[in-house]
Image (cartoon, helix red, strand yellow):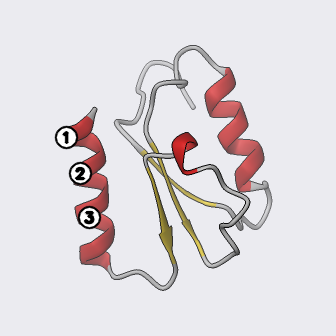
Amino acid sequence: IDGSVLPTAVVLDLELPRLAGRDLYHELRARADTSAIPVLVVTGSDTRDLNPANFACILKKPISVDALVEAVGRCIRQR
């Protein structure tokens, strides 16, 4: 992520094709400039091993666009 323009929130799919979503999550948390950005996980994978306290929310696929927009808005407002 270019440090000059940071996102308000990140929607992260754990099943990315080239990079493991979990690795990207840990990279975001390790950097001072991105550590406080809310991360919303969207996944079709098993979420039992995810700690809900680590994420702004965890959404299971399939998810509607309306539900995703509502979740992102909620996370931004809670910030």
Residue 25 drawn above or below residue 48: above
State the residue in front, 72 or 3: 72
For the point 41% across and 26% down, the residue is 5
For the point 23% across and 63% down, the residue is 70
Q: Circle 2 is placed at which residue position?
A: 74
Picture quarter containing residue 28? top right
State the residue in front, 2 or 47: 47
Residue 32 drawn above or below residue 69: above
Judging from the image, what secondary structure is the residue with disc 3 in?
helix
The percent position of residue 30, horizontal first and vertical second, equals 69, 23
Are the residues tagged 2 and 1 within 8 Å (C-beta)? yes
2 vs 3, front mark: 2
Disc 3 packing (10 Å; few <14; some 14–19; many ≥20): few
Mark 2–mark 1 distance (CA, rounded to whole Å): 5 Å
Q: Give amino acid for label 2.
A: Arg
Q: Circle 3 is placed at which residue position?
A: 69
Q: Give amino acid for label 1.
A: Arg
